[in-house]
Image (spheres, rainbow, N blue to C red):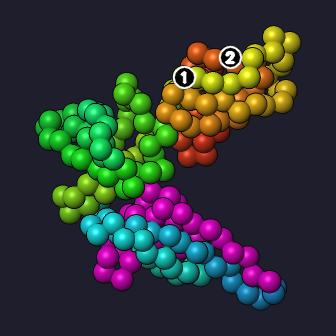
């Protein structure tokens, strides 16, 4: 796949190492004839080391073989998350640093969670497009606020802080986009 098509969570082969894309930043050229550069931060799936690279938009980075398995969260303890494959009941443990970007969205009653396996080793978790979270802390709701009015920060049960409309109150369930971290609607 081309460097300009890379997205967070994809698994690629970087110089013989199987890596997951953690972050992609596009750097525009200062001159008219220059190419846009993509600075990519990877995490090696097996060694968990951070790998960085810069690529032009048309540079090709080969995709790695990846298996997605539906899983259910069992428990979280000592800096690790344990999940169970819902098809064959195998259990897998992932360090918090391997899934640090996904942690604020993971709840006990979550459905649609998928484990990414590369060469039989757990590489990370893939979240559904949106999750439901409960607001635990925010400023008081304004009854006259419209849906297009100003926003306020709200803290959810997982610790995630989301900008929500002023009419949202503590204790309400909201839907949050897992790709952007933005408020979508009431649940």
Q: Looking at the image, can residue 187 be seen? A: no
Question: Residue 119: percent from the left, percent from the top?
Answer: 20, 63
Q: Does 180 sit above or below residue 186?
A: below
Question: Residue 6: percent from the left, percent from the top?
Answer: 52, 65
Residue 86 in which image quadrant: top left
Asked if residue 131 is among those painted magenta in the image, a careful observer would answer: no
- Element marked by disc 2: loop
Residue 123 in which image quadrant: bottom left
Q: Give the extent of the magenta segment.
A: 1-30
Residue occupying image coordinates x 52% and y 60%: 7
Badge 1: residue crowd in 10 Å (few <14, some 14–19, many ≥20)? some
Between 73 and 75, the one nearer to me in the picture:
75
Provide the residue designation for mark 2: 169
Tell whether 33 sits left or right of 117: right
Residue occupying image coordinates x 49% and y 33%: 158
Sequence-earlier tag: 1 or 2: 1
Residue occupying image coordinates x 31% and y 80%: 16
Label at residue 134: 1
- Element marked by disc 1: strand
Residue occupying image coordinates x 29% and y 50%: 94
Question: Residue 55: percent from the left, percent from the top?
Answer: 55, 81
Q: Does 34 sit above or below residue 71?
A: below
Between 59 and 26, the one nearer to me in the picture:
26
């Amino acid at each position: 796949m081309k460097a300009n098509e890379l997205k967070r969570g994809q698994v690629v082969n970087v110089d013989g190492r199987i890596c997951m894309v953690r972050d992609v930043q596009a750097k525009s050229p200062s001159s008219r004839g220059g190419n846009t550069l993509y600075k990519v931060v990877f995490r090696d799936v097996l060694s968990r080391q951070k790998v960085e690279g810069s690529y032009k938009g048309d540079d090709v980075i080969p995709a790695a073989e990846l298996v997605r398995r539906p899983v259910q969260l069992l428990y979280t303890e000592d800096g690790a998350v344990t999940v169970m494959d819902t098809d064959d009941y195998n259990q897998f443990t992932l360090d918090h640093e391997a899934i640090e970007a996904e942690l604020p969205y993971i709840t006990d009653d979550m459905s649609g969670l998928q484990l990414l396996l590369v060469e039989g080793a757990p590489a990370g978790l893939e979240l559904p497009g949106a999750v439901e979270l409960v607001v635990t802390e925010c400023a008081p709701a304004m009854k006259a606020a419209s849906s297009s009015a100003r926003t306020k920060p709200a803290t959810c049960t997982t610790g995630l802080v989301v900008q929500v409309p002023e009419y949202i109150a503590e204790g309400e369930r909201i839907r949050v986009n897992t790709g952007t971290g933005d408020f979508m609607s009431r649940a």
